[in-house]
Amino acid sequence: MGTDELGRDVFSRLVYASQVALQAAFTIVGLALIIALALGLTAGYVGKKFDYSVMRAMDALSSFPPLVFAIAIAAMLGASLGSTTIAIAVIFVPGLTRLIRAQTLAVKEETFVEASRAIGTRTHTILMRRILPNLASPLIVQVTVLLGAALLAEASLSFVGLGVQPPDPSWGQMLRRAYDAIFAHPWQMLAPGIAIALTVLAWNVIGDGLRDSLGHQPVKAPRAIRRKAGLGVTSVKENRIATKQPSSSAVLSVRDLEIRFATESGAVTVVDGVSFDIEPGEIVGLVGESGCGKSMTSLGIMRLVPTPPGWIERGSVIFDGRDLTSMSAKELRAVRGKDISMIFQDPMSSLNPAFTIGNQLTETVRLHTDLTASAAKTRSVELLDMVGISDPHVRLDQYPHQLSGGMRQRVMIAQALACEPRLLIADEPTTALDVTIQAEVLDLLRSLQRELGMSMILVTHDLGVVADICDRVVVMYAGQVVEQAPVDELFRQPRHVYTQALMKAMPQLAGRGERLTAIPGTVPLPSAFPEGCRFAPRCPHSRVECDRPMQLTQPEPAHQVRCIRSDELLEVVSS
């Protein structure tokens, strides 16, 4: 690299200046972080007047151009590395304080923080041991970015003569000397310039690496799946295995549906080979414990499984002679909401809090019909009246938070039935409601189903509800169908041990003062599904042969079961 105008070796000064640059960067960011943590944590957790005062002070500091403000502070304190460090740290404090305060406001509402407060934990302990560790990820990324910014700021101030003073070397000072001799020795600009650029880039790469190593690396689906992903549409793997022929009379035929998810340990199957039909006007119940794949199956039918990390590995979903898994996003939009509608578990999170009930209902109506705005509003009033909401004209102008839980669910039902779909998927529509409102909503769904003549899939874990309104039952366990039959036959002769266990666990069957029956164990995680019968680890009747893969058998024309001992263990249950 040669020598500078005073005969000093450029490479030696460049290496020595790196120590100055890194030391200054760490000192600047460390000082700013200490101040910001004290202010941000306290302001976010305590709130009230202290929070207001801190944020107004940060607003005042942010109102000045950062570099101009730093130059002013450094000029007042005198030209030195120490003055530069303090000046740059001050301009970094507002941004860090806002970040820490915002994260603290979110974390302090978590249940584990409320539990700590409830047992009398000191505020200092809550801040240091409960809240601060949860700020690590965003702080690590922000700190590494600031390290690069601090290095640039220090070089800028040294360039204008307010930082490191001669004869001590710094990259900014070297740039200044090279600039003065740019016509005689232009190559001297390259060494410090490249050093600054590479160091800033390195800090950003280090930040990404630290974030990923702390367990926040996003899980990626296979490359082919990511390429096919569309907004709001589940990707479907190309060259899927051919499936069995669908029923010619069914409104919906699901065949060999398999849904997979990408995880850090590899792809796992969450829905495995699910097949069933729904006839016109039929109500089919999808039953099972939490984690059995019921909701994921219903999302797969609508192609609403998030991609990435999920995708449809194989299978078909035939609706009205058309395979939904082969449709484009545009074709699916024409079907969703018009021919097939879905009601979700929590109406509060499904309705948009920023728009009135009228906005959301009329949007659905106008999206799939040619009605004018006034006609769509009239239709919305009719829909609210149909689902039993009083004063529908008034409710149109209200927001979701102004309605009770039962009324919000009725609005969701009205929205789902706006275009009189042929198939309605109700994913545990009464989970978030109290017992009285649950009964009202179920009665409403049953009466509307009969009135409109539509088919319905009811996802639930309540066999009492299934016995009351369903025509046929599909029992799922660990992503597979283990039994399906007409509801009367299933309750009279449940053939699978899991179905029998679910029935014994029904509170309605327990006498007063008797201990409720529970199924021992839990549903395994998708990554830990057994090779054979997936219920075998919890089954009191399992044998060695149960460790082999199980296929659905059909002991009776309308009855299917996935158990090699179903005939031996057949149990007649009085209805």
Image: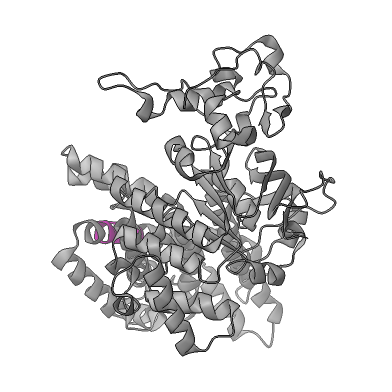
**Is residue 161 visible in this depiction of the protein?**
no
Is-magenta flag for residue 37?
yes
- The main secondary structure of the magenta stretch is helix
Say which residue appears at 40% left-offset and 59% top-offset: 347
Rendering quarter of residue 243? top right
Is 542 positioned to the left or the right of 149 in the image? right
- Tell me the magenta residue range: 31-41
Is 265 positioned to the left or the right of 139 in the image? right
Say which residue appears at 62% left-offset and 25% top-offset: 534
Query: x%, y% of residue 329?
Result: 69, 68
Compare residues 551 and 399 and report the one nearer the observer. Answer: 551
Query: x%, y% of residue 52?
Result: 19, 70
Query: x%, y% of residue 452?
Result: 53, 63
**304 vs 187: above or below:** above
Compare residues 574 and 395 and report the one nearer the observer. Answer: 574
Judging from the image, the colouring scheme is one colour
Query: x%, y% of residue 389?
Result: 33, 68
**Is residue 315 visible in this depiction of the protein?**
yes
